[in-house]
Image (cartoon, rainbow, N blue to C red):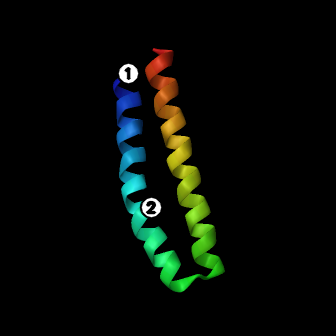
Amino acid sequence: MFKGIGFLLIAIGYAGNYKKYLNNYKSHKSKENLLELIGISLIIVGTFVLGICYIFGE
């Protein structure tokens, strides 16, 4: 259960940085930034899902 809470906290931390990247993306709009946004969003979703699985799995 504690691992699950840790994963959720990491996901929330990434989500906080995600807003910064989103603002940067709006100002630059390059393909590299788009790929970075996709990568970060996958990390957020993956970490969030892992956290939920840990919490309900244990």
Count of labels in the image: 2
Residue under the image location 54 percent in, 35 percent down: 49
Q: Quadrant of residue 2?
A: top left
Amino acid residing under circle 2 = Tyr
- For the residue labelled by badge 2, is the local secondary structure a helix, a strand or a loop? helix
- The disc label shown at residue 18, or none: 2
- For the residue labelled by badge 1, is the local secondary structure a helix, a strand or a loop? loop
Residue 15 image point, x, y percent: 42, 53
Residue 35 image point, x, y percent: 63, 69
Q: Is residue 10 left or right of residue 25?
A: left
Name the quadrant of the C terminus: top left
Amino acid residing under circle 1 = Met
Q: Reply above or below: 31 against 53.
A: below
- The disc label shown at residue 1, or none: 1
Residue 47 image point, x, y percent: 50, 41
Q: Reply above or below: 43 against 58.
A: below
Q: Reply above or below: 27 against 55.
A: below
Q: Which residue lies most toward the top here?
A: 58
Which of the pair 19/52 is nearer the observer? 19
Marks 1, 2: nearer the viewer: 2
Q: Reply above or below: 53 against 50.
A: above
